[in-house]
Amino acid sequence: MTEPALLPDVRLRPAATPPPRDPRPGVSGLGGADVARLVAELGEPPFRGHQVADAVWRSGAAAWDDVTTLARPLRAALAERLRFDTIVGTTSRPADGGTTEKALHRLSDGRLVESVLMRYPGRADRRERNTLCLSSQAGCAVGCPFCATGELGFERDLEVAEIVDQARHARRRLAGDGRHLTNVVFMGMGEPLLNLDAVIAAAAALTDPERFGLGARHVTLSTSGVVPGIERLARLRPQWTLAISLHAARDPLRDLLVPLNRRWPVADVVAAAGAYARATGRRVSYEYVMIDGINDTPADADAVARLLGGSGAHVNCIPMNPVAHTPWQASPPGRVAAFAERLGAAGIGVTVRRNRGQEVGAACGQLAAEQAGEPPAPSVARRRERLVVESAAALQAARSGEAPPPDVRRARRGPGSR
């Protein structure tokens, strides 16, 4: 067994008939006590457990056959019980002069998930950073209309090891250049707080000094607004950064852009995020995708300022990545700058983020959607027409303070509308 090859010119396509998922757990999803117990069951001395941990977390091994510190019979016995790597194939595409790398990973049942590795060279005022954006689900059930993952729909939650192994892959790629992974953000495919048990366990593995070893403040969990999940995190009081996908501050518009808003309105989301900030002492960040003519007006900026005023939160303004199934476009740079300036003048911390990797579809879900094949043109046309109608109604409601017409509300679909 060898490391799954990086194949820039080969597409990983979903299998016509997906194979069954490999029932063996991934070793990276186990804690030290679990590994020690398994080693004891195999009749091996305790120090073998430490050797397994070293191979998983501190070596460049990509498969059990590479772990030469263990005898062949033990490697074979471990391979019968555990997968060394839950990712069975990877294709990658570089962009931005090699500072961005989009990876598409195939899992044992043929599901495709994405991760994006972003390199930020060191400067006089800042150390080098290497940040991985990883996925927590295959597909997504939230259905935000500006997100390519929403086009794929929801397939399944990822296992703990399937999440962690995305980071292990990135670490091996960086090690080849003499670099190391410094930050992880759960902002890839899926809604992390709808797979919260696995995400908490994965973040714990990534920040455990005996396992992956990242600092807790170098991990960010992003959510579109799952209030019970935010409240659970606040009770746990981790030092992870919480990021909220905001995108609109008024409910009628956010109902359209973030369908979960119909279940957990934006004021409730911000209140839960504020409680997280107070419990952990960590500043909450808000992601705001800028969509031309939809959510980028001075009135939208003022609504964000009123919503977040006094919270100490920080807003990241991000021009929308182009997505085939939506009629919308990114806000022009001048309007993004004016929006950010208006927030800053109102006392809100704000940063304008530059999109990276657009030429390789580095936005969430774009590469997986491409590999899955283009949807039929009539379906795309109908979706675009529906979004034009719905966005017009939502804008009218947001700007008048009235609810959208009932027929528009019925036309919308998403997990919060059930």
Image (tube, grey):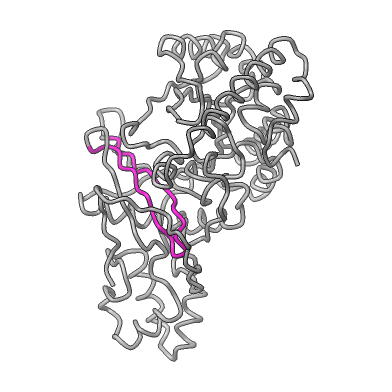
Disc count in the image? 0
**Outermost residue toward the front in this view:** 378
Where residue 211 sits in the image (x, y, percent)? 42, 62
In the rendered structure, the answer to whether residue 368 lies left or right of residue 175 reads right
* Picture quadrant where residue 141 is located: top right
In the rendered structure, the answer to whether residue 289 lies left or right of residue 407 reads left
Where residue 246 sits in the image (x, y, percent)? 59, 28
Residue at 44% x, 91% y is: 43
Q: Does 326 appear above or below 37?
A: above
Where residue 124 sits in the image (x, y, percent)? 25, 28
Q: Along the line of sight, which residue is nearer the eye, 39 or 208?
A: 39
* Picture quadrant where residue 272 is located: top right
Residue at 51% x, 22% y is: 327
Q: Does 333 appear above or below 387?
A: above
Q: Does 64 appear above or below 410?
A: below
Region in magenta: 98-120
For the C terminus, the image quarter is top right
**Outermost residue toward the bottom in this view:** 43
Where residue 202 sits in the image (x, y, percent)? 51, 56
Answer whether residue 111 is magenta in the image.
Answer: yes
